[in-house]
Amino acid sequence: MQFTAKVTDISKQRTACAIIAVDNKNRFTDSGNALDKASNGSLAKLLKRGDLGSAAGSTLMVPLLEGGAERALLVRSGKTPISKAEFRKLADASAKAVTAQKEATSYLAEVSVSDADANWQANQLALAAGLAAYKFTRCLSEAKPYPLAKFTVHASDKKQLKEVQKGVDIGSAQGLGSNVARELGNLPGNICTPSYLVAEAKALAKKHTKLTTTVLDNKKMESLGMGAFMSVAKGSDEPAAMIAMNYKGGKAGQKPIVLVGKGITFDTGGISLKPGMQMDEMKFDMCGAASVFGVMNALVEMNAPVNVVGVVAAAENMPSGRASKPGDIVTSMSGKTIEILNTDAEGRLVLCDALTWAGKFKPSVVIDIATLTGACVIALGHHATGLYANQDKLAEELISAGETTGDRAWRMPLWDEYQPMLNSNFADLQNIGGREAGSVTAACFLARFAEDYNWAHLDIAGSAWKSGAAKGATGRPVPLLLQYILNKK
């Protein structure tokens, strides 16, 4: 989709749909008043009839016979100034309402929002439009994508235009990255295999000269001593891969941010087999890896002035005669030995070797992203991502990035008191800590392999996808990660 910022005269601007706000007293913003005047007061008359709902976020599509706009989408903004959360609601509702149009121009940045400027508003409008325009069609025989191909955000004057354009650029990149992640997450496990992810990473490097891709195959990982990773991979007929996408857009010698994504392209649980109900959703167990792909795609499209390495630990977790058994002991790349008490706690086994390998890039910070524990869903539901960090400043910066984008995270404890729950009688540590504090002990496990650098862990088991009628990948936490990275440039 094409995104742009523009100073427009709504009474003359040619557009398939002009999006305007209406407050709780049926008052328009400045552009809305101008459009109403151009249409001989027809919009105000419609409002008096009560056709637009009173709840904030209600929308009404109206055909126009006068002026440059073919239609107007009226959006109820409520009592102003509104909060950031309320503005996101308007942005989402309006974006979903215009996906059937070929293009649209939004004037919602004229709405007064507490503690927000036009840059932030434009960011949210572009992000919402990008997300709303996505539809999974890859495996459907007749489905067509949404026609929305162009989205313009109105700036009030030339002075404001620069800031609005910046917001549009970041928001559209966040939408692009999120949709890349959604597409990979939504693909079935028979298509999106570790080999498929390897091909995607190589294709990205072929298109962009600032990005190079390195792939470790099974033989190479075994030679490097990645016994934890290979204990998961060996149960599948599909070859595993450790992928590194190295983007050098920043200054030479600048230490990179390293993102590490869990890429279990399908998770049966292995010998500790999962229940059959909703097992199909275990194709989403690679959404951490998908988010890394989303961020890397967005960065290269933006030509962002940063150095970032995206590491993906890709494998299937399958039951077979070769699969690991509960009670097996393996040696990780770090040299630490691990007693595998549950083969369904495989994410931490692939990630621990990936975290050790990530140290070779001499990172400024390492952030891993994983659909790691059902316990995180119990703790936080589907609204917040669980955040763990070994440095307070890093945690604060990630939380702030989430608050800015609406892709929110909540910090969880990473206390030494939890570490004894991972003690093993037979190895350096075991891969589960019992029923209590399952998300915390999983993070404590990973922390033992990230002691040499600043590190954060994002448990996205509750935020990476939706179930039920709206089943599908969400693309989170791509907006959070991109905001964090761009804040550091």
Image (cartoon, grey):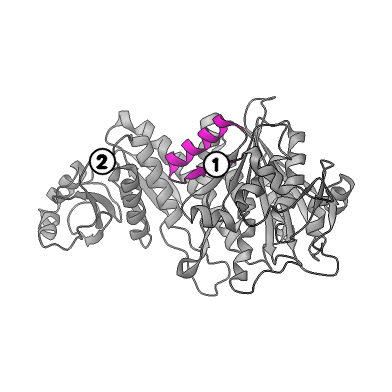
On the image, the x and y values in percent for residue 277 come to 59, 74
Q: Dot 2 corresponds to which residue?
A: 110
Task: State the residue at coordinates (33%, 60%).
Answer: 97
Please indicate whether residue 310 sits to the left or right of residue 53 in the image. Answer: right
Earlier residue among tags 1 and 2: 2
Please name whichever residue, 387 or 158, is drawn nearer the observer in this view of the structure.
387
Residue 341, relative to residue 6: is it above or below? below
Classify residue 17 by image quadrant.
bottom left
Q: Can residue 463 be seen?
A: no
Mark 1: which secondary structure?
A: helix
Mark nearer the viewer, 1 or 2? 1
State the residue at coordinates (63%, 67%).
188
Horizontal and vertical percent position of residue 99 = 38, 60
Residue closer to the observer: 150 or 371 = 371
Residue closer to the observer: 119 or 207: 119
231 lies above or below 4: below
Please give the label number shown on residue 49.
none
Direction from residue 98 to residue 274 in the image, left or right:
right
User: Left or right: 28 with respect to 117?
Assistant: left
Residue 55, how many percent across, how many down? 23, 57
Question: Can the viewer see residue 14?
Answer: yes
Residue indicated by mark 1:
481
Q: Which residues are magenta?
A: 391-414
